Amino acid sequence: MRFRRSAVLALAGVAALAVSGCKLADNNPGAQDPEFAKIDGEFLKTGGNGDDWAFPAQSYGEQRHSPLTQINDKNVSELGIAWFADMPDARGHESTPVEVDGTLYVTGPWSKVFAYEAKTGKPLWQFDPGVDKARGVKACCDVVNRGVAFWKGKLFVGTIDGRLIALDAKTGGEIWSVQTLDPKSNGTITGFPRVVKDKVIIGNGGSEFGARGFVTAYNVDTGKQAWRFYTVPNPKGEPDNAASDKVMKELAYDTWSKTPKKDDWRDSGGGGTVWDAIVYDHELDQLYLGVGNGNPWNHGIRSNSEGDNLFLSSIVALDPDTGEYKWHYQETPAESWDYTATQPIILANEKRDGKDVKVLYHAPKNGFFFTLDRTNGKLLSANPFISGITWATGYDLASGRPIENPEARYEKTGKLYMANPSALGAHNWHPMSYNPATGLVYIPAQQLGGAYMPPVAPNEQGRSAMGFNTGGAIATADVPDDFNMVKAIQSVTTGQLVAFNPKTGKAQWTVNYPTPWNGGTMTTAGNLVFQGNAMGKFQAFAADTGKLLYSLDVQSGVLTGASTYLVDGEQYVAFMTSKGGAFPLVSGYVAGASQEVPNIPRLIVLKIGAKGTLPPLPPAEEWVWNPPALFGSPEIIAAGQSSYQRYCLVCHGPGAVGTGVLPDLRKSGTIADAATFKSVVYDGILAKNGMASFKTVLKPEEVEAIRAYLTSRAHFAKANDAKFKVSAR
């Protein structure tokens, strides 16, 4: 069943107007619907019998495993499109669909929420929080949102501008809203909330921009703050009147440098944001936080190369009632590479040495798969889940510390360090899943190297009000204009689906992809693993062997994981398509074959025997390069390149090579006219569209130098773009 985009938006717009600004009197809407009311802590312990998928990660254990078997390894090839809905914003869609009692909920860019009939696709309502789109400049990796949490008839969603909002699941009406962080800060929210007992818990992102990490719990009915835990010490050396005060004083503070230096953690905030992984262990009544990277990345600048910098890149266990510290394990001490521990966490039970052990599985950016005893945080094993890791050779199980390669410490050597993995990680935010029947964890892994080097350009030395603050040579590093080198980089920038066996510490089977940034996984008791990929395919594999059983061309990339549910006795599989997130924004020519995959934001729902089809893609039109005349001296163009890479690269790509998410500035008509270009970059006339003004960090002559650089890139593209690209179809 197909719904045309205009009809979907028109109906959704009417519903949005109906709920806009509405404050509901009833703070307990779940009491009005028995099916909605049953979605509580007892339900989330297991995720139920599979009829509903009420939580993005399926259950408290976050295994993303469904007990449903109607769709299985014998009939999955019969899956077809039941219905689809086009989404309004062509940015990254990272939401896992949530379904309860026949209603399907998804989120989109700019923190919007949408509700549909799960069986037919009929649009029910949409909620737009009205985010100031200029805020997008503070979102490191696209203006994405990873979904809603359902609880007793309420939906909870975090917004890119730092609000936590409770909605009525029936109507989309706002029940309450609380600002979780200072609106003037550089924090953002892209992850989905977790609900534990009577509290809804949320973290934030923004380490690259100077945010300080914390996690906050709020009352589910009123939005009143219950507790807050900071993940790094107060830069002023003072208590925060928070649950973290005691452990910061007794343990964490001494792991940071004591002597203040310019642009160190006291100026930057230290980082440590918890932008995704927050997991509740109902068996042990513990809450686990996956903590992010430091700010700046460079440990030499951040902490004078002193100390482990707790609790960066750590798993931290808290008391969910009070927020008080229980234990921690730091995966990457003194991290200097953006090796976050914010990737998904899975809870399981495992036989070890004849004993039942409650374990925590984690496959973070740094490339090692960790198994922890979750009763106390003890490291049980740490094994690579990708090949060719360069920063460490392994882990000492006695001390729990990595065995580092000294050359990886670029902040100490002062030399260029070629790393695998890069800051984008061996595994990023994309959901992984666990199948109890196979004992395997299904990881969307990637081979994605990168370079690190201490700052060398003047505009890299200190913190900036805008742009990444890495403490590294971001303004002087670029993909070279060398065809053979670009092709070589493309050939080793790849992806994998890794079925990892925690008991053996090795991959049981793998599936190779030509590009990274493939979607998250979902597994079922039907011996299936579902995953979409960056090349526009949604596929199902046999969970035990990895055999490809089903492949559907969905016309666009798939970022997040799927969900599955029953309505009227029929099993459905739901997922979203689009391009976006960090890699497409920063990859340029390195994106390889995925560069030309269309960016189509869409919700797709499948069932056995369905015969729906997607509309044909419009004919591809070859871009005719007609750049304005070159101008500016080589020195001006070089200065423009430096400023571009410092402030523009993370959204518009290295070398100004776009990949179909944000505008390719080489093709922009604004570069033909100095006044028009200045009005956008300096004056901010497109701020309401998400292009903020950069007047706080750039002078008018620097803006003009960027225009000169972009013009030169357009001329390079006219001569070389065709041969640098890799055809996707």
Image: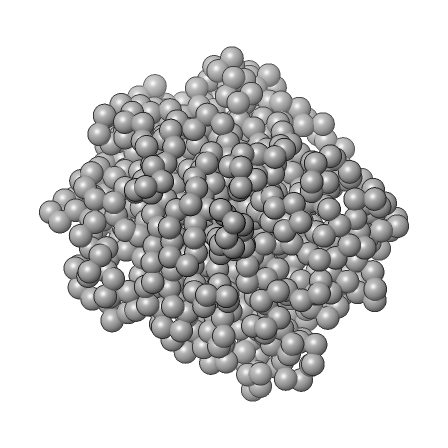
Which sits in the foreground, 126 or 558?
A: 558
Q: How is the image coloured?
A: one colour
Q: Residue furthest top?
A: 484
Q: Position of residue 523 (x, y in %)?
A: 67, 49
In the depicted view, which residue is nearer to us: 29 or 658?
29
**Camera sees residue 682:** no
* Left or right for 483, reference 471: right
Does residue 360 appear in the picture of this structure?
Answer: yes
Give the x, y percent position of residue 116.
72, 64
Residue at 43% in and 49% down: 372
Q: Residue at x 46, y 65 (%)?
A: 284
The answer to whether residue 651 is left or right of residue 705 is right
Which is nearer the eye, 511 or 729? Answer: 511
Q: How many marks?
A: 0
Task: Using the image, determine if residue 56 lies above or below residue 141.
Answer: below
Could you say which is closer to the camera, residue 320 or residue 612? 320
Farthest-out residue, bottom = 25
Q: Residue at 58% across / 44% down in the picture?
A: 441
Name the quadrant containing residue 162.
bottom left
Furthest-front residue in this view: 354
For residue 594, side relative to residue 320 (left or right): right
Q: Quadrant of the C terminus?
A: top right
Q: Image quadrant for the N terminus?
A: bottom right
Residue 123 point in image, percent of width and height: 74, 65
Quadrant housing residue 317: bottom left
Lateral position of residue 675 relative to residue 515, left or right: left
Expressed as whole percent of the image width and height from the top left, the position of residue 456 reads 25, 28
| Farthest left residue in view | 259
Image vertical order of residue 492 relative to residue 550, above or below: above
Q: Is residue 512 positioned above or below 560 on the image?
A: above
Q: Residue at x 62, y 64 (%)?
A: 46
